[in-house]
Amino acid sequence: MEREEFHLLIPGPTPVPPRLLRAQSRPMINHRGPTFAGLLRRCLEGLQYAFQTRNEVILLTASGTGGLEAALVNTLSPGDRVLAVTIGAFGERFADIAEAYGAEVVRLAYEWGKAARPEDVRERLAHPGGRPFKAVLLTHNETSTGVTNDVRSLAQVAREFEALVLVDAISGLVAIELPTDAWDLDVVVAGSQKAFMIPPGLSFVSVGPRGWAAYGQARMPRFYWDFEKARRSQERGENPFTPAVSLMYALEEALEMIRQETLEGCQARHRRLAGAVRAGLRALGCEILAEPGFESNSVTAFRPPEGISPDRLRAYVLERFRVVLADGQGPLKGKIARFGHLGYVGEEEILLGLQALERGLRALGAKVSSQGMMEAVEEALAREEGSHE
Ligand SMILES: *Cc1c(COP(=O)(O)O)cnc(C)c1O
């Protein structure tokens, strides 16, 4: 039997709920007309809820990386000193973009799998070894390693030194706590194809008062990404260019789903499923890459038991069960596999993924117990149930 769909357990793009797919297929409208203005207004209001902010949220037609680029070029000038705190591939990318636009980037890089330490950031900011740092680049959730940073504490340290805080929250926002205003974050970037459950193509950027103040001085070249141009258009119920209207139909619907579940409920679901994935993987003899205490609730990076190739394991579950897991990135390519559990996922997807892995590990020669794995998963699920109800 021919089947179109896969069981997508990668950290983006994530599965799109049927309700969103239907919304996306609506007829096209005039992006300079009143119907669009209503759609945009509802999207922007919903985004403020998702970001937990009163700040203007800029809606960009771009993948997440476009949002990162926008965050940088609207707040910095060539030659500005920037501290890039990097714990994996996406932290490196954020730093690379800043460098491409002429910032003087100093990296505070950690071994992949580790989280950033506020005391290291303080130490670096206190002894800049040159001009003071204008901004600190942070990754909320490092998708390449499955590590979530303590953004609240890291941002607090940056504030002590009056550095602007720019946060890549592309794979974290909505799934993992990140209250923009309560944590006083200047610029926060999210993307459509992760916890927002929408196909790739939109990026969202919250810009706070200090972000706008920085905009006034920022001299990096920009045109498509210009925040002020976007803000003025959004005020009129428009976008400066032709936006991805179909994706916005899906966004409106997604934001409605998130509101119905509530942000707290959504984050509790991610926490519970992530706990179950980690328990199940450990019971299968896999090693979780993330340092304890900083494990991501949206993606788990893991090493299979000794002697088993992650690539062969992924190939097995893909061919046999249409279960799609992600490879490692950069230095971890071929060394780990990544299990995405964010967005439109529930217990059934998690169980399917774990059972496929159990079968794959067995086929590749590991000694694994299906019963032991299921018991560990059930126990983890029950534990989180108890703690949230
Ligand atoms: C997915 C992701 C990005 C990049 O987004 P694209 O949509 O691929 O441009 C950036 N940062 C993090 C943390 C991500 O997970």
Image (cartoon, grey):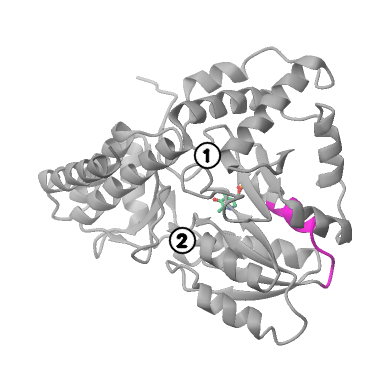
Estimate the x, y position of residue 134 in percent, counting from the top left.
75, 70
Look at discs 1 and 2 and give the one toward the viewer: 1
Q: Residue pushed farthest top? A: 27
Q: What residue sits 46% from the left and 58% below the top?
A: 148
How far is mark 1 from mark 2, CA to CA? Answer: 19 Å
226 to the left or right of 114: right
Estimate the x, y position of residue 116 in percent, counting from the top left.
50, 70
Estimate the x, y position of residue 104 in percent, counting from the top left.
76, 74
Mark found first going from the N terminus, 1 or 2: 1
Task: Give 375 or 182, whichever is nearer the viewer.
Answer: 182
Say if 17 sits above or below 204 in the image: above
265 to the left or right of 121: left
Q: Mark 2 highlights which residue? A: 333
Say if 330 sits above or below 196 in the image: below
The circle on residue 13 is 1
Residue 240 seen by the camera: no
Image quarter hosting the C terminus: top left
- Disc 1 marks a residue whose amino acid type is Pro
Residue 112 seen by the camera: yes
Estimate the x, y position of residue 155 in percent, counting from the top left.
59, 64
Q: What residue sits 30% from the left and 49% below the top?
A: 275
285 to the left or right of 219: left
User: In the image, which residues are magenta?
Assistant: 68-79
Say if 58 sits above or below 153 in the image: above
